[in-house]
Image: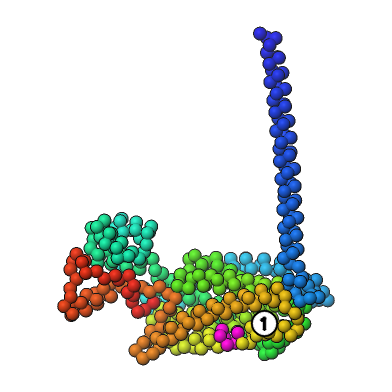
Amino acid sequence: MRALIPTKSKSFRRGWRLRYRAEVIILQGDIQNSSIFQGRMLTWLRELSDWVWQDRLWFPAGLGWADLKDRDGLVFAKGSDLWVIFPIAVCFLIIRQIFERTVAVKLASLLRVREKPRVRAAPNTTLEFYFCNASKFPSQSSVEELTKQSGCSVRQVQRWFRRRRNQERPSQIKKFREASWRFTFYLLAFIAGLGALIDKPWFYDMEEMWNGFPTLPLLPSQYWYYMIELGFYISLLFSVATDVKRKDFKEQIVHHVATILLISFSWLVNYIRAGTLIMLVHDASDYLLESAKMFNYAEWRKTCNYIFILFAAVFILTRLVILPFWILHTTWVYPLTIYPPFFGFYFFNGLLLVLQCLHIFWAVLILRMAIKFLPGNDIVEDERSDREETDSDEEEEDHEKTKNGFVQNGNGHTVLNNNHHHSKTD
């Protein structure tokens, strides 16, 4: 028996070594194959990058990235400069939190912004489950089914959903704080942009923005104007989930993305003079809208109306006149008299056309709000906002029905769908 033990032990060790060597060989093969795959991927990405950033796509014939290298004391825009926008965006998010919790709160108190009292929906498991998982606006048939499941009348179910929806709507203070933050930034950005451009020749003669293109040296004021604007719009994308959601939420996302792409691209290919003019045109009216909303939340109706009239005039002048007929004309028509068209030319102007379509969309909303200045209307509502529903609408309807001889019974057989009745103020 003892003679067999070493034999088995040697056989076992020999088999174990063979299996170990086989696994090592397989592992080495996997590592080699992985290295080959990674090498091929890097090569493919390098070739893709070379193709995407080739000179003929982004510059006129005979010009390219080599023309944007620093030389003779002149500094030009570089793609690596854009990395700074991310820490700037984080700084904006931090500053915003501090601003909204200190300055905005004190300003709201100074303007006497008051929170409207809201009646909370009574706890109801059945209705709460439907609200969270099915729909916040139940159809008439769903309401009738919910009355059977919850033991409530039709009117009680409708009232419960109305109050429950109101609970999720942002408060006046939250909307005021957000508007005051944006007002502060847009106002300061407009003043800074105007100060950076007021003494530049292309501010008065827009054809000058192409004089010497693309070898246009970068000015310190242009650098900071670009980085701060880009950082702010990046911060808006980061905070979009917590900001007040409006009816044009999707359009706002498209606007932010198109703006970031437009500003970044104009930086990369040195369309900086055109980019600064476009940013200034946008900042010219935005702070007026935010200030009008601030006074609207504070219920300073006449002040809000006057500022809104001024905003509408500036918006139409800058977005529907100056931008398409001056700036777009200078970026779309005039360059063709100097250079043959190239892909970067179409890409830049395509983004501008996306913004212009959004401007037309918002201009329609502004005109709809302007109708409220007609006789008998003394309140400006933000057409993009979700309006708050009140129980007084329901009571007024009951009063009218009583006057006309129709009274709704307690069982809710005569049904009115109150899902779309709203108060007049935002």
- Looking at numbered disc 1 in the image, what kind of residue is underneath it? Trp
Q: Nearer the viewer, residue 38 or 125?
A: 38
In the rendered view, does 233 fall on the left or right side of 55? left
Question: Does the magenta portion include 323?
Answer: yes
Magenta-tinted stretch: 318-324
Residue lying farthest left? 405
Q: Which residue is mark 1?
A: 332
Residue at disc 1, secondary structure: helix
In the rendered view, does 203 fall on the left or right side of 144? right
- Depicted 27 relative to depicted 15: above or below: below
Instruction: Residue 167: give x, y in percent of width and height.
Output: 36, 66
Q: Quadrant of residue 216?
A: bottom right
**Residue at horizontal 54%, vertical 80%?**
359
Quadrant housing the N terminus: top right
**Residue at horizontal 73%, vertical 56%?**
44
In the rendered view, does 367 fall on the left or right side of 209? left
Q: Nearer the viewer, residue 213 or 293?
A: 213
Q: Quadrant of residue 423?
A: bottom left
The rendered magenta stretch, by its main secondary structure, is classed as helix
Instruction: Residue 411: give x, y in percent of width and height.
Output: 19, 64
Instruction: Residue 195: give x, y in percent of width and height.
Output: 64, 84
Please indicate, yes or no, whether residue 142 appears anywhere in the rendered image.
yes
**Residue at horizontal 45%, vertical 88%?**
306
Question: Does the magenta portion include 18?
Answer: no
**Residue at horizontal 75%, vertical 51%?**
39
Q: Residues within 10 Å of mark 1 (few under 14, many from 20)?
A: some
- Depicted 134 relative to depicted 348: above or below: above
Q: Quadrant of residue 72?
A: bottom right
Instruction: Residue 115: give x, y in percent of width and height.
Output: 36, 73
Please indicate, yes or no, whether residue 160 appears anywhere in the rendered image.
no
